[in-house]
Image (cartoon, helix red, strand yellow):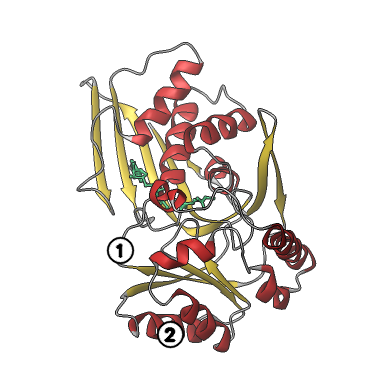
Amino acid sequence: MVRVLIPATSANLGPGFDAVGMALSFYNEVCLKPSPKELEIDVWGDGSEIIPKDRNNLVYIAVTKVFESLGKIPRNLKLSLKNRVPFARGLGSSAAAIVGGLVAANAYLGNPLPTDELLRLATELEGHPDNVAPALLGGVVVSGFDRDKVKYLKLPVPEVEVVVAIPKFQLKTVDSRQILPVEIPFSQAVLNVNRVSFLIAAFCLKKYEYLQIGMEDYLHQPYRSQLIPGFYQVMEEAKKAGAYGVALSGSGPTVIAFARESEAVGRAIREAFLNFNVEAEIIYTRPENRGAIDLIMHKGEGDC
Ligand SMILES: Nc1ncnc2c1ncn2[C@@H]1O[C@H](COP(=O)(O)OP(=O)(O)O)[C@@H](O)[C@H]1O
Ligand SMILES: N[C@@H](CCOP(=O)(O)O)C(=O)O
């Protein structure tokens, strides 16, 4: 029996589109064990009513990927999934599903695949590495393709509190990628290079006040914000309440803010959303330096 925790993730952090992501301190759980049946899948928590319980389940697809890459066929398996990462809200539920399946299957088979290969498989399934990399490795991760290889660097974990405001509506990443333009003006691209440079420098130098500009984005937020009522007013109110920086989390609709003390920021975001008739659940959390590879539970550390 194998049990793995997989952290939620916030990808992009503003201008780091498809390149930067952070693991957060709340987790999905994937349990894999033998079964007398060909395949059993139990799902508990967010999305459980619509997540497939057959071979089309994304966690199972990831399990299969590991078995097949080792020339094996997955048989007589039971998957138990506990979902605490909100489903299709921009906090990496698909990344958690993929990474959970890969890490659980690899551990079940005695860990034959190295971490870089798990990241490569995860990126192949997700299409971009920015959320699967921190889900797998923890912390803040910069990642990207170098031809067909996925390269990554882990940054120091920022000493900040994190607020995520999760509107009560879903937004699938495939849909919110579709509204992005094919081209953007050169001047906007230049601004984005500038902002992402401040983002990384602010984290590395612990100059968190520079996140105010370091989390501005000109690539995707101007387009995706049209799907999120009150997005820019929410950002303004969060900054007024003391946030270091605010951005869309992943592909949205969740908003993420960093702060030294997060409660006032959380309240300001909730109220600003309410002014636009959007109810948002507020979670106060922290960056998580451990990824799924560090969170493989052993006997005695809870049951499935
Ligand atoms: N626990 C889970 N088990 C199986 N599939 C999941 C799970 N969580 C998410 N998914 C898959 O991921 C998709 C949502 O991914 P996506 O739109 O990228 O949202 P998010 O921003 O939360 O990652 C769902 O439609 C479903 O196919
Ligand atoms: N870079 C991707 C990140 C998607 O993250 P998710 O957590 O919303 O799946 C994008 O912005 O499309």
Tell me the CA gap for discs 2 and 1.
19 Å
Mark 2 C-beta closer than 8 Å to ligand 2: no
Along the viewing direction, whichever of 28 and 132 lies nearer the viewer: 132
Q: Quadrant of residue 12?
A: bottom right
Q: In the picture shown, does residue 106 fall above or below 183?
A: above
Q: Indicate the secondary structure of the residue bearing disc 1.
A: loop
Q: Position of residue 60 (x, y in %)?
A: 35, 30
Q: Amino acid at mark 2?
A: Arg
Q: Residues within 10 Å of mark 2 (few under 14, many from 20)?
A: some
Residue at numbered disc 1: 169
Residue at numbered disc 2: 267
Quarter of the image containing the N terminus? top left
Along the viewing direction, whichever of 72 and 35 lies nearer the viewer: 72
Q: Which residue is drawn at the image coordinates 38% and 67% (left, top)?
A: 166
Q: Position of residue 165 (x, y in %)?
A: 42, 71
Q: Quadrant of residue 189?
A: bottom right
Along the viewing direction, whichever of 109 and 113 lies nearer the viewer: 113
Q: Indicate the secondary structure of the residue bearing disc 2.
A: helix
Q: Which residue is drawn at the image coordinates 24% and 37% (left, top)?
A: 52
- Left or right of residue 44: residue 27: right
- Left or right of residue 174: residue 132: right
Q: Amino acid at mark 1?
A: Phe
